[in-house]
């Protein structure tokens, strides 16, 4: 039986090692490539045809959402399963809209992970009931749109880092952008959301279940 070739992209070696161990116990899946950043991901994606890409949405540099779109532009047939530390409320719908075929949090058990990889690799879609509910909410009338839904993907990424307490300089370094650019993003975020300062951003994030400790 030919095994499905899995490309694993996560900037934490311990996560990659753990996933490789889980997949090594299967008869149909094998980790045949690894990447720790977006540049490596694109290089490997272009190098060969993969059965499925398991992608962390928060690797350093280019955001995972941008990366999903880049990959889909070049390899539209490559199934992408997002495996993230971020709760589903924070990124799942955006990831699916960007072109991912599934979304799982790193809190998921190994059986669920394997089931999701197999479904996505077979051309299916894996989303939880919670993500399905969020996607239905996303088609509600415009008058009911929540302020954070108005943010672009990059603005949303900066928003997440701001509410986690990450400084502008550190955000710029993590995203390979200038402090001036990050400051401009912050201004646009506050304007779009009708908020006055970082404190109000944090309160908003907590109220809407969008806040968590940052990994940056």
Image (spheres, helix red, strand yellow):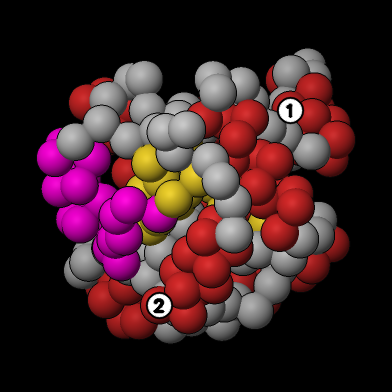
**Residue 148 image position (x, y, % from top left):** 64, 46
Where residue 94 appears, as percent x and y from the top left, is 56, 37
Residue 150 is one of the magenta-drawn residues: no
The nearer-to-camera label among 1 and 2 is 2
Q: Is 40 colored magenta in this rendering?
A: yes
Where is residue 99? Give x, y as percent: 46, 28
Q: Which residue is mark 1?
A: 135
- 7 sits to left or right of 178: right
Q: Quadrant of the C terminus?
A: bottom left
- Answer with the quarter of the image where residue 62 lies: bottom left
Residue wearing tag 2: 13
Whether residue 199 is visible:
yes
Residue closer to the observer: 32 or 193: 32
Separation of residues labelled 1 and 2 (CA atoms):
32 Å
Q: Secondary structure at mark 2?
A: helix
Query: Residue at the location (54% across, 20% down)?
Result: 123
Sequence-wise, which precedes: disc 1 or disc 2?
A: 2
**Range of residues picked out in magenta:** 31-47
Of residue 73 and residue 89, the one placed in the foreground of this image is: 73
When asked about the image quadrant of residue 170, the answer is bottom left
> Relative to 151, does residue 212 appear above or below in the rendering?
below
Total number of numbered labels? 2
Going 27% across and 25% down the picture, which residue do you hit?
75
Lateral position of residue 147 relative to residue 83, left or right: right
Q: Is residue 164 left or right of residue 107?
A: left
Answer few, some or many: residues within 10 Å of disc 1's Cα (few below 14, many 20 plus, some between 14 and 19): some
Q: Between residues 104 and 114, which one lies in front from this camera angle?
A: 114
């Amino acid at each position: 039986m030919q095994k499905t070739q899995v490309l694993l992209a996560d900037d934490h070696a311990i996560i990659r090692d753990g996933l490789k161990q889980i997949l090594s116990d299967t008869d149909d899946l094998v980790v045949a490539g690894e990447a720790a950043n977006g540049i490596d991901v694109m290089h490997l994606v272009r190098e060969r045809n993969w059965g499925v890409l398991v992608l962390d949405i928060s690797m350093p540099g280019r955001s995972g959402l941008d990366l999903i779109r880049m990959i889909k532009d070049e390899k539209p047939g490559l199934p992408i399963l997002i495996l993230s530390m971020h709760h589903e409320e924070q990124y799942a719908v955006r990831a699916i809209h960007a072109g991912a075929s599934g979304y799982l949090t790193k809190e998921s058990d190994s059986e669920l992970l394997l089931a999701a990889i197999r479904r996505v690799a077979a051309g299916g879609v894996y989303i939880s009931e919670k993500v399905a509910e969020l996607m239905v909410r996303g088609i509600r009338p415009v008058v009911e749109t929540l302020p954070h839904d108005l943010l672009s993907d990059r603005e949303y990424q900066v928003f997440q880092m701001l509410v986690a307490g990450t400084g502008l300089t550190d955000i710029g370094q993590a995203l390979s952008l200038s402090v001036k650019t990050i400051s401009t993003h912050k201004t646009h975020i506050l304007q779009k959301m009708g908020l006055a300062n970082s404190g109000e951003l944090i309160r908003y994030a907590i109220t809407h279940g969008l806040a968590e400790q940052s990994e940056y």
